[in-house]
Image (cartoon, coloured by chain):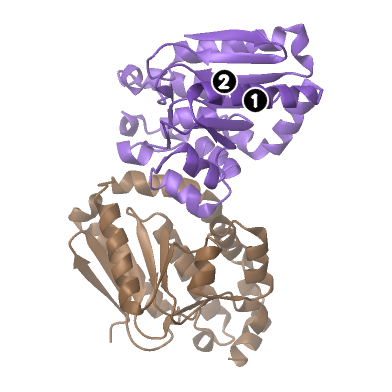
């Protein structure tokens, strides 16, 4: 069963996390996403004037790491973290504008996945952005914080999200300057992403240059992708996964 | 290419002529020479302010790529001279005001942002990081300055990754600039008024410069290199 599909619509590449589950970020799913991204990169028509849209089926964009799968195994936890860091690295260096069309909850690592895109559009009728770690007793790694600090400018908003585990609706996300637009339904969200994508495609930007400029902006994040100091604190992860 | 006028406590540097004020070594040298003159003026050590402005349709349209295109050495020289200029402005021993009276693009936008205050006319002209549109990489030092001056991540994305053409009105709303005025003359007048206000504070220039350098420490550190010059063929 495919965990994600890739569709080409003109110059838009649409990556969809399929199925009605929580789209937990385990190695299988992360590998599938990275594989789709690699297929896009090797498509010669993608060198300029292209756009990636990442979206999902069901109630969840992604509910974060697959803590149940990882359990208390150090190897599994390290593997999951290392794969997600590689995926975020892929997205930051992706040679075209990227849009996350958030059609459900995006929590913890799922929120980070959304934030790793250039533009975020979201449905406002349900779903929220949520750094759940505080509530489940998990530490947030430095590299997550680097993403948050690059993408969320307001200090108070950052505090609410990180230290208060606030659940942010699409409407609040627009107001806080975290997301670009909120739409009334799933269909309108994806349509909005496509419309934005078409606008960006028309600019005909060179993908390589775009990638280099983006890497320059998120250098701080790239520098931190080499490590995750929290995966060493396995007891906490085991407790968190037992709270699920 | 540029003139220096002293008006009371104010030092007014004007990029002259109706051209695009492209930042090539000749123009940059002329600007740096004026800045040296200002520093050397015995009355400039406190209670002073610098205003940088320009004649014509352009504040500055960025690097002189046409001139530099013919050789990697020219590109490197231009980059190195511009970085030295930006460093001087960021360490300048008095408040600095950019009175943006025309388009400010790419390195021209960075030149404006290298000032403490930015005022701009709202009847014409825009701020534009044009690099992604013309297929040029942006050096880390430029991005560091933008990061320090433009606080909102979505605005930064629009400026750098979308090459948004920003009018003065938008720039005020997005907190990129301080204030917008109805014409070039009013912008310069506004700069002079602000300059006098700041000069009246009687700040010690050396201390002001050092405090700004401390504030901008992370940015200044990055102006020592331009890594985009390593892959020179891409730039050409």
What residue did someone put label 2 on?
B52
Q: Chain A is drawn in which colour?
A: brown
- Determine the image quadrant of residue B127: top left
Dot 2 and dot 1 residues touching (CB under 8 Å): yes
Secondary structure under tag 2 reads strand
B27 w.r.t. A147: above or below: above
What residue did someone put label 1 on?
B96
Name the spot of residue B173 as percent of width and height, x first.
53, 47
Q: Which of A41 and B43 is in front in this view?
A: B43
Nearer-N-terminus badge (2/1): 2
Chain on which label 1 sits: B
Name the spot of residue B2 as percent of width and height, x first.
51, 10
- Determine the image quadrant of residue B91: top right
Q: In which quadrant will I find the C terminus of chain B?
A: top left
Secondary structure under tag 1 reads strand
Check if mark 2 and mark 1 are on a common chain.
Answer: yes
- CA separation in Å, label 2 and label 1: 8 Å
Label ID, residue A184: none
Chain that is coloured purple in the picture: B
Q: Can residue A168 be seen in this view?
A: yes
Name the spot of residue B136 as percent of width and height, x first.
35, 36
């Amino acid at each position: 069963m495919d965990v994600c599909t890739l569709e080409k619509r003109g110059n838009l590449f649409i990556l969809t996390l399929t199925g009605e589950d929580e789209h937990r970020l385990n190695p299988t799913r992360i590998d599938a996403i990275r594989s789709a991204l690699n297929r896009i990169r090797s498509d010669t028509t993608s060198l300029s004037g292209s756009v990636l849209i990442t979206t999902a089926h069901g109630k969840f964009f992604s509910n974060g790491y697959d803590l149940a799968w990882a359990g208390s195994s150090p190897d599994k936890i390290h593997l999951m973290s290392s794969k997600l860091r590689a995926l975020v690295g892929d997205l930051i260096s992706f040679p075209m504008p990227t849009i996350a069309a958030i059609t459900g909850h995006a929590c913890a690592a799922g929120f980070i996945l959304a934030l790793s895109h250039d533009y975020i559009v979201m449905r406002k009728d349900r779903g929220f952005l949520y750094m759940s770690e505080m509530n489940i007793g998990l530490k947030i790694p430095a590299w997550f914080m680097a993403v948050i600090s690059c993408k969320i400018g307001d200090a108070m908003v950052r505090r609410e999200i990180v230290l208060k585990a606030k659940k942010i609706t699409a409407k609040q996300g627009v107001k806080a300057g975290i997301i670009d637009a909120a739409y009334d339904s799933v269909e309108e969200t994806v349509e909005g992403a496509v419309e934005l994508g078409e606008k960006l495609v028309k600019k005909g930007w060179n993908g390589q240059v775009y990638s280099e400029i983006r890497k320059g902006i998120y250098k701080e994040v790239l520098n931190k992708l080499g490590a995750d100091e929290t995966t060493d604190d396995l007891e906490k992860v085991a407790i968190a996964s037992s709270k699920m | 290419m540029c003139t220096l006028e002293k008006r009371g406590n104010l030092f007014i540097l004007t990029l002259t002529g109706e051209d695009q004020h492209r930042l090539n070594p000749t123009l940059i040298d002329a600007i740096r020479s004026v800045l040296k003159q200002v520093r050397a003026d015995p009355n400039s050590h406190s209670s002073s302010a610098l205003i940088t402005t320009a004649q014509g349709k352009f504040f500055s349209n960025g690097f002189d790529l046409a001139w530099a295109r013919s050789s990697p050495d020219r590109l490197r020289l231009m980059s190195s001279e511009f970085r030295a200029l930006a460093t001087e402005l960021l360490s300048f021993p008095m408040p600095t005001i950019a009175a943006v009276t025309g388009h400010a693009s790419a390195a021209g936008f960075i030149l404006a942002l290298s000032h403490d205050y930015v005022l701009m006319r709202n009847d014409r002209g825009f701020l534009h990081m044009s690099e992604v549109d013309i297929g040029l990489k942006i050096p880390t030092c430029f991005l560091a300055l933008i990061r320090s001056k433009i606080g909102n991540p979505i605005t930064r994305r629009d400026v750098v990754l979308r090459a948004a053409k920003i009018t003065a009105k938008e720039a005020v709303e997005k907190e990129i600039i301080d204030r917008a005025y109805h014409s070039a003359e009013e912008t310069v007048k506004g700069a002079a008024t602000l300059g006098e206000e700041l000069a009246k504070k009687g700040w010690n220039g050396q201390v002001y410069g050092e405090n700004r350098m401390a504030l901008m420490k992370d940015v200044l550190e990055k102006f020592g290199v331009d890594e985009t010059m390593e892959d020179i063929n891409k730039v050409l």
